[in-house]
Image (spheres, grey):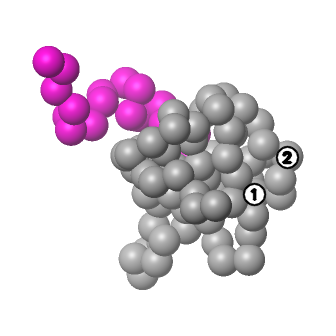
Amino acid sequence: MNAPAVQRTLVHLRDEAGETLLTLDVLINGWVRLSHLEGQPILCAEMIEDLLHEAATSGLDPELHAALLWELDLLALRGDGGWQPG
């Protein structure tokens, strides 16, 4: 079975060289998916809060987890300007 398609990427963290460190995607089925460094598990959950908990207990680097929380806080405070209702 194929993985659900990405509806929207919420967070895309990169290092100084431009290499992807992690992405947080909203899937077509409404779930969220966290993909990060090669060789690490891809985490999926029904809600962002559950995904963040899974990420914290999965061995995700604490600095990456903190950066993800920071980006989500900024997104919640200012939005991304990419979606207009109606």
Q: Is residue 80 one of those drawn in magenta?
A: yes
Q: Report the side of 38 relative to 67 (left or right).
A: right
Q: Is residue 54 magenta?
A: no
Q: Secondary structure at mark 2?
A: helix
Rendered image: mark on residue 60: 1
As drawn, which residue projects farthest toward the front? 1
- In this orientation, which residue lies closer to the viewer: 62 or 60? 60
The Cα atoms of the two marked residues, 1 and 2, are separated by: 7 Å
Mark count = 2
Q: Amino acid at mark 2?
A: Thr
Query: In the rendered view of the protein, which quadrant contains the N terminus?
Result: bottom right
Q: Amino acid at mark 1?
A: Leu
Q: Which residues are magenta?
A: 67-86
Q: Could you tell me residue 86's position as x and y percent? A: 14, 18
For mark 2, what is the residue?
A: 57
In this view, 79 is above or below 66? above
- The prevailing secondary structure element of the residues shown in magenta is helix
Disc 1 is placed on an element classified as loop
Judging depth in this view, the residue of 25 and 18 nearest the camera is: 25
Horizontal side of 75 relative to 56 (left or right) equals left
Residue at horizontal 57 percent and vertical 37 percent from the top: 31
Residue at figure coordinates x 55%, y 67% from the top left: 21
Residue ID at (64%, 72%): 37
Q: Quadrant of residue 56?
A: top right
Q: Position of residue 35 (x, y in %)?
A: 60, 60
Is residue 11 in view from this perspective? no
Q: Is residue 64 visible?
A: yes
Q: Is residue 9 left or right of residue 4?
A: left
Neighbour tally class for label 1: few under 14, some 14-19, many 20 plus, Cα within 10 Å: some
Q: Which mark is residue 16?
A: none
Assess disc 2: are there few (<14), some (14-19) or many (≥20) residues with their C-alpha within 10 Å of its C-alpha.
few
